[in-house]
Image (spheres, rainbow, N blue to C red):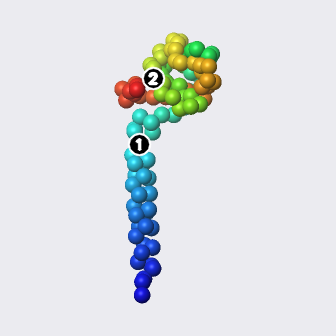
Amino acid sequence: MTNRMKHGARPTALAATVAAGLLTALATASPATAAESAAPECVQYHQSWRYTDVHNGCAETVAVTVAYTNGQWAPCRVVGPGQWATFAGYGTDGNYVTGLRTCDPAATSGT
């Protein structure tokens, strides 16, 4: 006679182990990503099809990046009070800006 409980336990244990591994990988994601938050309200952007211009209206220097609808990478730029920085625009495919995020310029790398 075959004990069906023994055979069913192995796939369940494997699935639980894989799920735990994935959750651990997500929890230990890049510190730069985890530290990002919305940019202060005094930092604003103006987008066009070609460029996204970011203006720092704050009294202090900020490091910001742009978040796009398709998740494309954008550099982290340090912008002093009253200064502007330029990022990619939404282009012909409508890749619009969804917001500005703070970032760590030392931890940013492009592809």
> Residue 39, position in %: x, y?
54, 28
Q: Residue furthest left?
A: 106
**On the image, which quarter does residue 19 sit in?**
bottom left
Question: The residue under label 1 is which amino acid type?
Answer: Ala
In this picture, residue 96 sits left or right of residue 25: right
* SS at badge 1: loop
Q: Is residue 94 above or below residue 21?
A: above
The residue sitting at 61% across, 23% down in the picture is 93
Q: Position of residue 6 (x, y in %)?
A: 41, 77
Residue 101 makes an appearance in the image: no
Disc number placed over residue 29 in the picture, else none: 1
Amino acid of disc 2: Pro
Residue 110: percent from left, percent from top: 40, 25
Seen at 52% across and 18% down, the residue is 87
Disc 1 from disc 2: Cα separation: 19 Å
Q: Is residue 38 above or below residue 77?
A: below
